[in-house]
Every structure is written in structure tokens, then in C-alpha cells.
């Protein structure tokens, strides 16, 4: 049975993909998955479509409907709950490599 999963991901994007010119960043990602392994596989597959490289996945968990994740993430969770094919991304925080 699929449930809504949430995680914070760190990715490397292609040069020129971000207006800032940064190539590294992190964001929240929310999507339906049947297990932790399924979620990880779907996340990696999603970013591969854009030729972005997944660097890490942190705090991956099934969404707890009783938790207040803040306005932005709560809205994304609500949108995801209405569409089993949805992949929703939170604000992308980018930075340059050291």
C-alpha cells in the first residue's frame, strides 16, 4: 500500500540550470511510495530525468498527518494527497561548491 513520503534531498544540478549559477542545493521532496526502498528509487529516478545527481537523502519518512510541517510543506502534502503520480518539491536552496 502506498503512502506519502517526505525527505530532504541534496542534489547536484547541471551548470546553467539555476539562474544563480549554483550547482549544489537541497530541498524537500514529497511523493507516494510503497516502501523506503521504493521511495529512494523513485527519488533517484526523478532527478535522473533532469540529469541531476542525487547526493543524499535525509530524514525520509512517511508523512505524519498530525504534524505541522509549515505552510509551504503542508500545502505540498495536500496537493500530493490528491494525485498519486505527483512529485512535489519544496523551495530549492542552492549553494556553490567550496
Image (cartoon, grey):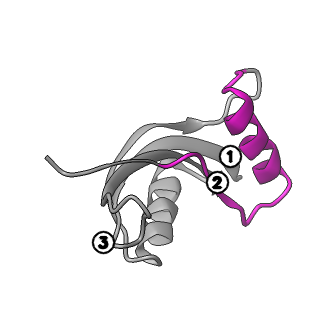
Q: Percent x, y for residue 80?
A: 76, 52
- Circles 1 and 2 in contact, beta carbons < 8 Å: yes
| Residue, disc 3 | 15
Give the residue at x 41% y 74%: 48
**Residue 89 sits above or below residue 84 on the image:** above
Q: Single out the residue that lies furthest toward the front.
A: 20
Q: Which residue is mark 2?
A: 31
Binning the other alpha carbons within 10 Å of mark 3 as few (below 14), some (14 to 19) or many (20 upward) gives few
Give the image location of residue 9, x and y in percent.
Answer: 42, 47
Mark 1 vs 3, N-terminal side: 1
Q: Nearer the viewer, residue 26 or 41?
A: 26
In the rendered image, which residue does mark 1 sit on? Answer: 4
Q: Is residue 15 magenta?
A: no
Sequence-earlier tag: 1 or 2: 1
Q: Residues within 10 Å of mark 2 (few under 14, many from 20)?
A: many
In this picture, is 4 found above or below 46?
A: above
**Which segment is the magenta one?**
67-92
Q: Is residue 50 left or right of residue 33?
A: left
Q: Are marks 2 and 3 in contact (CB under 8 Å)?
A: no
Residue 48 numbered tag: none
Q: Could you tell me which residue is drawn at 70 percent across and 21 percent down?
A: 67
Separation of residues labelled 1 and 3 (CA atoms): 31 Å
The Cα–Cα distance between marks 1 and 2, rounded to whole angstroms, is: 6 Å
Q: In x, y percent, where is residue 94?
A: 38, 49
Looking at the image, which is closer to me, 32 or 16?
Answer: 16
Picture coordinates of residue 63, whole percent (x, y) = 66, 35
Amino acid at each position: 500500500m502506498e503512502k506519502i513520503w517526505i525527505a530532504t534531498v541534496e542534489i547536484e544540478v547541471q551548470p546553467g540550470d539555476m539562474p544563480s549559477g549554483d550547482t549544489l542545493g537541497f530541498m524537500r521532496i514529497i511523493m507516494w511510495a510503497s516502501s523506503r526502498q521504493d521511495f529512494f528509487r523513485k527519488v533517484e529516478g526523478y532527478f535522473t530525468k533532469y540529469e541531476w545527481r542525487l547526493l543524499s537523502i535525509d530524514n525520509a519518512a512517511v508523512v505524519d498527518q498530525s504534524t505541522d510541517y509549515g505552510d509551504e510543506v503542508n500545502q505540498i502534502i495536500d496537493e500530493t494527497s490528491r494525485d498519486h503520480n505527483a512529485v512535489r518539491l519544496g523551495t530549492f536552496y542552492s549553494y556553490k561548491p567550496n
